[in-house]
Amino acid sequence: MQQQSPGSSKHPKPNMKSRGLRLEHITLIRLLEIFANILIWIILFLLMVQVVGRYVLNTLPEWSSEESTLLFLMWMAAVGASLGSANNSHLVVDSLVKVFPKKMQRVIEIIVYIIVTIFLVVAFYVTAQLAWLNRATLTPRLQIPMSLVQASIPFAMGIMLYYNIKYFVLSFRKESSDKEL
């Protein structure tokens, strides 16, 4: 086995010109990752303000309440679920499926894709309606529309639906390329 020197790898180093964030390199996954990072920093800042405000200043600014932290946590959960779908990394229990022959496994996979798609469409529709109906309802302390909080759920459902359909279509391409081999 040949040892590689530090700094060398099997993959070539990217050109220094391409290291910047240029529009053609931005993908939906990258945008979700950036959004998640921004949300994490906002949540950390809010928590820090809350701790300092409570234990040092004995008062909290209106905007730093648990309500605002909850708003960003809801969006963080939505973005995290979306990234899980985008990276195809949600938990899968497939030990029972692996007992079946390959053709039956493929049928089960198709059924699962269809069931998940139906669930995501229904969940998107219902939660989008809920967010729309609550557009005039304001949060108690911050006085922002509840639909801003609730919009995180149809946002996540829409992104997960996109990736579910994408991976479903790609599974047929993979299947056809496997048959050619």
Image (cartoon, helix red, strand yellow):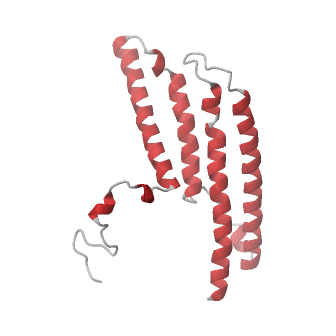
Q: Is residue 101 left or right of residue 71?
A: right
Compare residues 112 and 162 and report the one nearer the observer.
Answer: 162
Residue extending farthest front: 23
- In this rendering, the answer to whether 115 lies above or below 123 is below
Q: Position of residue 108 (x, y in %)?
A: 76, 68
Q: Position of residue 110 (x, y in %)?
A: 75, 67
Query: Image quadrant of residue 12?
Result: bottom left
Q: With respect to residue 58, does 169 lie above or below?
A: below
Q: Vertically, is 41 above or below 84?
A: above
Residue depicted at 54% across the width and 23% down the height: 67
Q: Residue furthest top?
A: 58
Q: How many marks?
A: 0
* Residue 91, percent from left and from top: 61, 56
- Find residue 4 and report its image quarter: bottom left
Q: Quadrant of the N terminus?
A: bottom left
Determine the residue positioned at 44% across, 59% down.
24
Q: Position of residue 29 (x, y in %)?
A: 51, 54
Q: Is residue 18 left or right of residue 34?
A: left
Residue at (61, 20) in percent of width and height:
139
Q: Which of the two residues, 48 or 63, is positioned nearer the viewer here?
A: 63
Question: Looking at the image, which residue is at 64% across and 55% down?
Answer: 162
